[in-house]
Image (cartoon, rainbow, N blue to C red):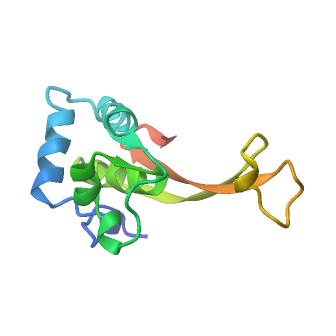
Amino acid sequence: METEQFLRATAYIDCDAEPVKRKSQEIVQGISAQRDKAVRIFYAVRDGIKYTISGQRTRPEHFRASTILSAGEGYCVQKAILLVAFARQHRFPHDSGLQQSEVISCPKKCWRREAPIYSLITGTQTCTWRIVGQGCADL
């Protein structure tokens, strides 16, 4: 599979948008090591973009990296999109996907009807990056 396809801008991963470019460069300013850049980008999205499950996500543009950056908030899928856009600015190929997880403790209103009363199956977004000379890192 061609690595270049994992580095291009897309309709949602608009890593070529000026606000995304500027913020991405600001995050890694003064850092030269690829691994250190990846770690800084990860923490910038994790800590700098508020996690919210009740934010905007009803329209396609709510899933565009530049829109997410502008909003300053998102849930796991939106934060992963922004993370990938920042990563592409620094030439990190990646893989992104959904992961199912079981949550034992949750409010009753979240329970799946067909599941046992203690169980909730949820999806969460994951990203795996290939850092040159470092192998893969799940972030």
Residue 91 appearing in the image = no
Q: Nearer the viewer, residue 92 or 12?
A: 12
Q: How many marks?
A: 0
| Residue 36 picture location, percent across and down | 32, 29
Residue 100 appearing in the image = yes
User: Position of 8 compared to 137: left or right?
Assistant: left
Identity of the residue drawn at 20% across and 43% down: 24
Identity of the residue drawn at 24% across and 59% down: 67
Q: Nearer the viewer, residue 59 or 79?
A: 59
| Residue 11 picture location, percent across and down | 27, 73
Identity of the residue drawn at 44% across and 46% down: 52
Above or below, 111 against 24 in this view is below
Q: Nearer the viewer, residue 112 or 100?
A: 112
User: Position of 126 compared to 120: left or right?
Assistant: left
* Residue farthest toward the front in the current orientation of the protein: 109
User: Position of 76 compared to 65: left or right?
Assistant: right
* Residue farthest toward the right in the current orientation of the protein: 116
Dividing the picture into quadrants, the one containing residue 121 is: bottom right
Say which quadrant the N terminus sits in.
Answer: bottom left
Q: Nearer the viewer, residue 38 or 51?
A: 51
Identity of the residue drawn at 82% across and 51% down: 119
| Residue 7 picture location, percent across and down | 29, 61
Above or below, 54 against 34 in this view is below
| Residue 70 picture location, percent across and down | 21, 51
